[in-house]
Amino acid sequence: MIFSALCHRGLRTIVDVAVLLLVLVLLPGIPPHATYTSYDIDEGRPLEGPLEPNNIIDSGERILDGKIVGPESVASKSDDEIFVSLHGGKILRIWGKRFDHFKIITSIGPGCDGPWQEKICGRPLGLRFAPDGRLLVADAYLGLFSVDVETGEKERLFDPSEEIDGAVPKLLDDLDIDSEGNIYWSDASAIADLSDGVVEMLSDPTGRLIKFDPNTKKNTVLLKNIHFANGVQLSPDHDFVLVCETFRKRVWRHWLQGPKAGKSEIFVEHLPGMPDNIRNKDDGGYYVSLVSVKSPETFDELKFLAKLPWLRKLMLRFVNIAKVVFDTVTWVYPNMYTEEISFKIFNLEPIAQHLSSNKTIVVELDAEGNIDGSLQGNSGLIRFISQTNKIGDNIFFGSPYNKYLGWLYVGVPTMEVEGKGVRMVERDEEKEPEAVKEGEPEVEEKEGISKVEEQKEEKEEEEKNIKPVEEKKVESKEETVTETVPKEEAVPVEVRPTPKEPGASTAEEAKERKEEVTTAKPTVEVKEHVEEKVSDEVKKQDSIKKEEL
C-alpha cells in the first residue's frame, strides 16, 4: 500500500516536471528572445605539422601580475610603450624597460562599484591607433570612441542605441581602420550583451561585421549571422577584411576591392580552439589567438548541444528564470551580492574556465590563410589569450580574464663583458644604472663592466697569487691525512742566538723556522696592508719564541 502510494506520487512528480518543461520549450514569448536550429561544430585540427606542440609561450612571463584585470586588447604607436584596455572601463598606458610603469590615461564610463556593473562603467575591448594618432576604442556597452592619449579626452563616434539594419548592436567587440578613416567593427551579438554571452553561444548566430563611415556617421552591415563575431583585421593592402567567428572555430574574409568585392568566404577553419582577436604579423600573415583550447580527451559539450536545439532552448529559458529572480531581489533591495550572482549566470568567463585546459595556442597564418606555425604553452603560465601583438622585440598576450599581461621577449641577446671573457645576456638580466650617491666617486662604465669591478677582480687575483697553496702531509699510526695550508710571504726575520736550555727550542729549529718563512716568494707585487699583516704575524712568533726561551 505504502509502496503503491510512493510510486503514484513519484509518477505524478515526473509528469508535472515534464509538463513544465514542455511549457518552457513551446510557449512563445519567454525570454531570452532567440531562435534555435541544429548546426554542426567541426572538429579542430590535430596538433601536428605546423601545429606541432611546443613550449614557446612557457618562456614568457607575467607583468603587472595582480595589479590589473582583463587586459583584453593591446595597441601601440612606438616600441617602448603600449596601451591596454581593462575591466572597469580603464585605458592603461604601460612603459619602461620591463614595462613595469603604468598610468591610467582615461575611463570610458563614469565609474562603478565593480565588474558586475560594467554596463555603467563600460568595458573597452578592441583598441587601434588611427592615422592621426588618436586611440580608437570599441566598448562593449557604450559604443565607439576616439581618445587623445596625451590629454585623456575622449569623443564618442557612435551610440550603440542606434538601430543598424533592423537590429540594435548589443556587443561591440573589435575594430580596425583604413587609410580613409573608415572603421570596420564587429557586433558579436544582436540579442545579448557581454554579460549574457552564453545566450549567443547557445542560440542561433546573430553577430555582424559592420563598416562605419565617420564622415556620414553611417553604419553598413557587411556580413551577418556570425556566431559571436570577434576579432577584426584589415589586409595590408586593405582589399579585404577578416573577422573571427568564435563559436564555430573559424575566420571569415570579406572582400572590399577587386573582382570579389562584396563577397565573403571562409579564410581558415577547423581551428584547434575558439579564436578571439586577430592581428598582423611583421613578416606578413596573421596571429590568431585562441582564447579557449579544450583538451581533445574531454567531452565536447558544445558539439553535443549543437544538434539539440530544443535542449539549448530549454536550458536558456530555465536558467533565465533564476536570473529574473535575482534581478527582482536586487531591484527591491539593492545589494552587490544578488547583483553579482545575476551578472555571472550568463557570463562567458565561468564557461571558459570549465571548457579550457592549461593548453595555450596562438595560430600563425600566412597571407592566404594557411597555417604555417604556432606559439604554444602547456604550463598554464599564460592562459585565455585574446590577442597577440609583436611590438619591437616583445610579444604581448592580452586576455579578457587574466589579472596580468603576458609578455615574451624575442629580441637578440646583447653582449656584455664579464671579467676577461664575453657572455650573452638576455633582456631580463639587464639592469638600469644605479644613481651615484653624493660623496661617492663617480663610476665610469665601459662595455658593461665598471672600473671598480675590474679593480676588485685584480685584487682577488693578487690575493690568490700571494698565498699559494702547498700540501703538507700529517701521518698517524693508522692513516695519512693531507692538509692544505697557505704559504706565508717571504719576510726577513732576525733570529737572535740564545743559550740552549733543556726543553727550549734549539738554534737549528729557529733556523729551520726562518728558512720555512723565507722560502716562499710572492708571485706579484705585495700590497702594503698585506706586508703589515705578515709582519705582525712574525712579531707574534718572535714573542712566543722569547717566552719559550
Image: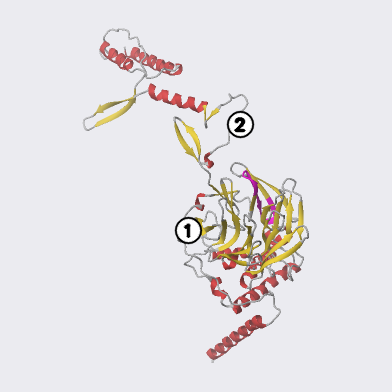
Image-based side of 90 in relation to 297, left or right: right
Residue 80 highlighted magenta (yes or no): yes
Under circle 2, the secondary element is loop
Name the side, left or right, on which 362 lies relative to 334.
left
The answer to which quarter of the image holds residue 441 is: top right
Q: Position of residue 318 (x, y in %)?
A: 64, 76
Report the front residue among 117 and 77: 77
Q: Nearer the viewer, residue 510 or 354?
A: 354
Residue at the spot 39% in from the left edge and 14% down from the top edge: 539
Q: Is the C terminus in the top left, top right, bottom left or bottom right quadrant?
A: top left
On screen, residue 33 above or below 425: below
Residue linked to disc 2? 435
Q: Position of residue 414 (x, y in %)?
A: 51, 38
Residue at (26% x, 27% y) in the render? 474
**Looking at the picture, how far across and down is residue 54, in whole percent?**
47, 55
For mark 2, does the 10 Å Cα neighbourhood hold few (<14), some (14 to 19), or many (20 or more) residues?
A: few
- From where the camera sits, is residue 537 visible? yes
Identify the residue under disc 1. Answer: 50
| Majority secondary structure in the magenta region | strand
Which mark's residue is nearer the viewer, 2 or 1? 1
**Which amino acid is tagged 1?**
Pro
Secondary element under disc 1, as helix, strand or loop, is helix
Quick one: which residue is furthest to the left in this view?
477
Q: Which residue type carries mark 2? A: Ala
What's drawn in magenta, residue-wise?
76-91
Taking 522 as reference, is 457 above or below it? Answer: below
